[in-house]
Image (cartoon, rainbow, N blue to C red):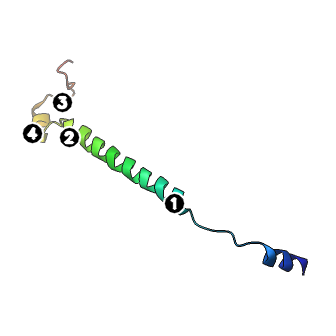
Amino acid sequence: MTVHAAAAAAPPVPYGPGLLGFIVVAAIGVALYFLIKSMNKQMSKIEVPREDEQERSEPGARPDGSR
């Protein structure tokens, strides 16, 4: 009985993350947007050799042309 009385007398605890939680999640979303944008920019700078160029090169040759 005392456990039930103590639980009933406790004030209700607000639940949920509230405004601070929303701000944190929104900031993570904005940071993710800019990180993905930067990654795409860096990926577009990478030059991948075409398949026909790879086949013409000598097997076992290094990409810089040395042996």
**How far is mark 4 from mark 1, CA to CA?**
56 Å
**How far is mark 3 from mark 1, CA to CA?**
61 Å
Q: Residue at x 33, y 50 (%)?
A: 33
Estimate the x, y position of residue 4 in percent, counting from the top left.
84, 79
Q: Secondary structure at mark 3?
A: loop
Estimate the x, y position of residue 63 in percent, counting from the top left.
20, 26
Q: Residue at x 62, y 68 (%)?
A: 15
Q: Toward the viewer: 65 or 60?
A: 65
Q: Residue at x 90, y 81 (%)?
A: 1
Q: Secondary structure at mark 2?
A: helix
Three-letter amino acid code of the residue under disc 2? Ser
Decide which of tag 4 and tag 2 comes sooner along the chain: 2
- Whether tag 4 and tag 1 are in contact, CB under 8 A, the answer is no
The numbered dot on residue 44 is 2
Category of crowding for the residue at label 2, using alpha-carbon neighbours closer than 10 angstroms: few (below 14), some (14–19), many (at least 20): few
Q: Secondary structure at mark 1?
A: helix
The residue that mark 1 highlights is 19
The residue that mark 4 highlights is 52
The numbered dot on residue 53 is none
The residue that mark 3 highlights is 59
Q: Nearer the viewer, mark 4 or mark 2?
A: 2
Count of marks overlaid on the render? 4
Residue 53 found in image quarter? top left
